[in-house]
Image (cartoon, helix red, strand yellow):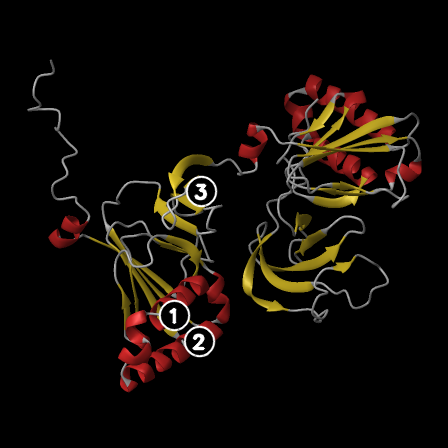
């Protein structure tokens, strides 16, 4: 039986607002502290957030912690004092591991029900004795116990039972019988097997005897299948090429990525093992848009630096306060953050060989120093400025943290391209309709 519907009521936790009340600084090197009820220094960060149930403000609490003999995780808990809705979930604070992991636990006693469990979104949970399965990505990640996992599945199956009894009484009766079997498992009247299979390698079942071996727990690491790689978003295409620096044979990795509230983009990266040269490039995965796009963003806060940014090859950048303009194709296509883009601009300007050395004039050097200082002030949030992206192809993007609502500091304009802009994009001579007519007969 599948527990695809065994999901706790409610929507994803909350949409975080910009304001936050940070917890006490744990000190350098101790961002992720071992989880402990006795650690008074370990306090969560509280963020005022939008409740997705009543659309009033609630509170999200984030705790960065470390599971002993495992790794770092982020525990988030949301509660709304207005409607009473709450939600708790966990996320791995590390990367996807090189191999998947499968935990097979034989539950023989009540002590086994109290074992700590980290179950990520990508993990599948099975109890073979009941032919029971909770598929991957049907539940949010959870920091719980073996008993908590079973209780969560029971709650998920029970939540729609009143509707089933009214419409499908026979189905409701069978689910009631199955729920009774799950409740019997919690009493551990007889041994049963719990399997947690996570291709990301970030789930965990506690070994209470650590660092000694646990006879009831079998941990298996395995290589992921192509389907699992694709499910985790790791599937990439590879093609052979030559290094642009040393011309040695190299491989380019290419991946199609969907940017929320925008479109698909193609990310390409080349790494030469011969000379160590690395390069990456971003291209739009779609066609040239019918209209050009001009994005004007007012930088007012240091947090603005973390916004995702996609600059296509056809996009120009302007910062009026610095009297700076970056033309098309300069810096190429990039998928980075606003901070990363500004740092690339600083490096481009300050390390220009034509503005350095004996050939540079004193006045030019002073202007460069002033430009660099003002750019640093923008990066630190001291100087407010406007960041303008103008893309005639309409394939550039700057993250709207208020999406799907409008961003009060961002203005997005769509405009009709000029003849010259169409000429630069090669659109004036492009025939997309009726091109079949007038072709020479094929022999």
Cα–Cα gap, marks 1 and 3: 28 Å
- Secondary structure, mark 2, is helix
Instruction: Find disc 2 in the rendering and name its residue.
Output: 376
Residue 24, image x, y percentages: 71, 71
Instruction: Find disc 3 in the rendering and name its residue.
Output: 257
Which residue is located at x 83 percent, y 38 percent? 147
Viewer-nearest residue: 317 or 222? 222
Q: Quadrant of the C terminus?
A: top left
Of tags 1 and 3, the one toward the viewer is 1
* Mark closest to the chain's N terminus, 1 or 3: 3
Instruction: Find disc 1 in the rendering and name its residue.
Output: 346
Question: Quarter-wise, where is residue 250 in the image?
Answer: top left
Which residue is located at x 83 percent, y 64 percent? 39
Which residue is located at x 64 percent, y 33 percent? 136
Q: Is residue 296 left or right of residue 272?
A: left
Which residue is located at x 33 percent, y 54 percent? 332
* Mark closest to the chain's N terminus, 2 or 3: 3
Q: Is residue 352 left or right of residue 276?
A: left
Question: Quarter-wise, where is residue 57 in the image?
Answer: bottom right
Whether 437 is drawn above or below 343: the answer is above
């Amino acid at each position: 039986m599948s527990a695809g519907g065994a999901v706790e009521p409610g929507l994803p936790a909350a949409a975080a607002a910009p304001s936050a009340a940070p917890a006490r600084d744990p000190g350098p090197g101790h961002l992720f502290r071992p989880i402990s009820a006795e650690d008074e220094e370990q306090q969560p960060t509280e963020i005022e957030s939008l409740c997705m149930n009543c659309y009033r403000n609630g509170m999200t609490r984030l705790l960065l912690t470390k599971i002993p003999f495992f790794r770092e995780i982020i525990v988030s808990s949301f509660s709304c004092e207005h409607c009473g809705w709450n939600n708790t979930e966990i996320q791995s604070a590390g990367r996807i591991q090189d191999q998947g992991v499968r935990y097979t636990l034989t539950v023989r006693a009540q002590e086994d029900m109290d074992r700590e469990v980290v179950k990520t979104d990508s993990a599948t949970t099975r109890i073979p004795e009941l032919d029971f399965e909770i598929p991957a990505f049907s539940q949010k990640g959870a920091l719980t116990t073996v008993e908590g996992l079973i209780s969560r599945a029971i709650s998920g199956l029970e939540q729609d039972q009143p509707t089933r009894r009214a419409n499908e009484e026979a189905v409701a009766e069978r689910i009631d019988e199955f729920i009774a079997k799950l409740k019997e498992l919690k009493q551990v009247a007889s041994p049963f097997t719990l399997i947690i299979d996570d291709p990301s390698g970030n789930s965990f079942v506690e070994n209470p005897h650590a660092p000694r071996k646990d006879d009831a727990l079998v941990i298996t690491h395995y290589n992921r299948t192509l389907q699992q790689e694709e499910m985790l978003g790791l599937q990439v295409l590879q093609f052979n090429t030559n290094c642009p620096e040393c011309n040695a044979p190299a491989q380019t990795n290419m991946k199609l990525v969907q940017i929320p509230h925008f479109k698909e983009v193609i990310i390409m990266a080349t790494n030469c093992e011969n000379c160590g040269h690395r390069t990456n490039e971003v291209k739009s995965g779609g066609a040239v848009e019918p209209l050009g796009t001009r994005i004007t963003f007012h930088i007012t806060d240091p947090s603005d630096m973390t916004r995702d940014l996609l600059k296509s090859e056809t996009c120009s950048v302007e910062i009026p306060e610095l009297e700076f303009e970056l033309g098309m194709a300069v810096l190429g296509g990039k998928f980075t953050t606003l901070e990363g883009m500004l740092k690339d601009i600083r490096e481009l300007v300050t390390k220009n060989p034509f503005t350095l050395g004996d050939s540079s004039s004193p006045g030019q050097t002073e202007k460069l120093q002033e430009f660099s200082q003002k750019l640093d002030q923008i990066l630190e949030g001291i100087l407010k400025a406007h960041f303008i992206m103008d893309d005639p192809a309409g394939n550039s993007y700057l993250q709207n943290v208020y999406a799907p609502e409008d961003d009060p500091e961002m203005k997005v304009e769509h405009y009709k391209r000029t003849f010259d802009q169409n000429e630069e994009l090669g659109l004036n001579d492009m025939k997309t309709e009726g091109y079949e007519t007038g072709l020479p007969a094929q022999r």
